[in-house]
Image (cartoon, rainbow, N blue to C red):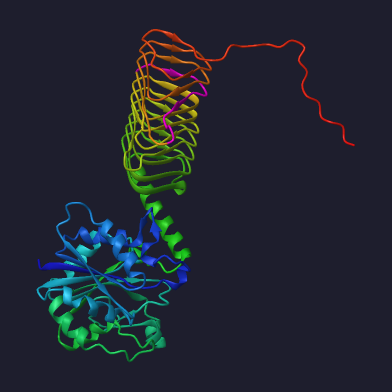
Amino acid sequence: MAEVDVVIMAAGKGTRMKSKLPKVLHALAGRALLAHVVDTASQLQPRNVVVITGHGAIEVEAATAGYICAGADFSINFARQEPQLGTGHAVQQALPLLGDDGVVVVLSGDVPLTQADTLRQLIAVGGGDKLALLTLELPDPTGYGRIVRSGAGEGDAVQAIVEHKDASDTQRAIREIYSGIMAVPAAPLRRWLARLDNKNAQAEYYLTDIVKMAVADGVPVVAHKISDEVQVAGVNSPVQLAALERAFQQRNALSLMEQGVRLADPARLDVRGSLQCGQDVSIDVNCVFAGDVALGDGVQIGAHCVIANARIGAGAVIHPFTHIDGEKLGVTVGAGSLIGPFARLRPGAQLGAEVHIGNFVEVKNATLANGAKANHLTYLGDATVGERVNIGAGTITANYDGANKHRTVIGDDVHVGSNCVLVAPIHIGAGGTVGGGSTLTKDTPAGALSVARGKQVSIANWSRPLKKAKP
């Protein structure tokens, strides 16, 4: 097989998106459209990837650097297309970055869901010496370039691609369209691009004109026709982006169910990253998974949960309306734990087995050992909590002094009463008890009862202030 170079066209403004953000940076399934295309290109094991930029070039180029996976063995380069004079003109800008000894695969930065296997088949059909086009039949081909063949049969040779605005009525009746994706030998591509002109309805340099040049030069033009419209669907408006989002999520939901995941409603699931599920996982409606999420065997996810960058251990139950976001530090929930409803686990929350985090409890950069419980109305930040600790309602670890964060350490088997403030840095000794309503500022010994609150006073026959009469 010849070396593969990939050219991704990402120079367009995307006027119909009605946004300041370059079109290829709009998100689908939590990632930029262009990021999906770069991922697909990387699966072809290319020698080189050239991204053609134009509108918002600086922003697009800066973002693209973050789309390359660690350990990638291909280079990525950029070619500027300014002004934008058509698809042929775009690929002309990439020529100085391409060798003559390979196959060039042309992709679009706003067509995010093409599968790598489809592109491998396209390259194989081209065989390294033919011009291979990815085509599709549509019931309404309006707006697309039509595949003109030598006859009416599917096996007849491709003669040209005619853009919709330049097509005759007869040609517009053709339903086989060009997807915008091709695999073409690099050496003849260079010759053909040099011969392009802009004598057409849009006064642009069409890349599709190289088809008739290939035919004239005796280079075979072959079509690899697929039936999956989603793979070649582009994004030109928020409406199209939303439709493609739902198509992606529907396919993702189907894949999860085929793996054995129980989805209460496949139409109400959003995966915006990687979701790995063990056996007998169940997910209720309107849940969002982002980043890198793994659910162990038997995990139950309640309705309306948002979970990002987290590992949920086997048998854990995440009750409805729980928000878990590990960001870069990640979140770990141990096996058999019960979380929520209305709980929030923030970056660095590391929970052992059988931990209970209840409603309106927030955990950040804290470790809770096996069996620890904070069942309601609590903040645990920058804390190390031992085994079987019970945290009463309304308790907080006061971890911030206005300039620096400090850590709270709570030993095994501690019982903290309700409405307590533990002012860090502080160490609560193992087996100790903190009386309700206490504000502790000093370490406590193991096994001790620690109480720090004002003496209760009752004033008999006290009268509340009365409102002054209006004049």
Vertical relation: 371 (above or below) 120:
above
Q: Is residue 167 visible?
A: no
Vertical relation: 426 (above or below) 121:
above
Vertical relation: 397 (above or below) 33:
above
Residue 107: x and y in percent read: 27, 69
Q: Split into 4 quadrants, where in the image is the C terminus?
A: top right
Residue 353 position by quadrant: top left
Q: Nearer the viewer, residue 130 or 459?
A: 459
Residue 22: x and y in percent read: 39, 67
Instruction: Answer left or right for 445 relative to 379.
Output: left
Most prominent secondary structure in the magenta stretch? loop
View extreme (bottom): residue: 199
Q: Is residue 390 magenta?
A: yes
Instruction: Answer left or right for 348 relative to 455.
Output: left
Residue 63: x and y in percent read: 31, 60
Residue 93 position by quadrant: bottom left
Q: Split into 4 quadrants, where in the image is the N terminus?
A: bottom left
Residue 367: x and y in percent read: 34, 27
The range drawn in magenta is 387-402
Q: Which of 446 and 286 is in front in this view?
A: 446
Q: Is residue 314 magenta?
A: no
Q: Is residue 351 visible?
A: yes
Residue 311 position by quadrant: top left
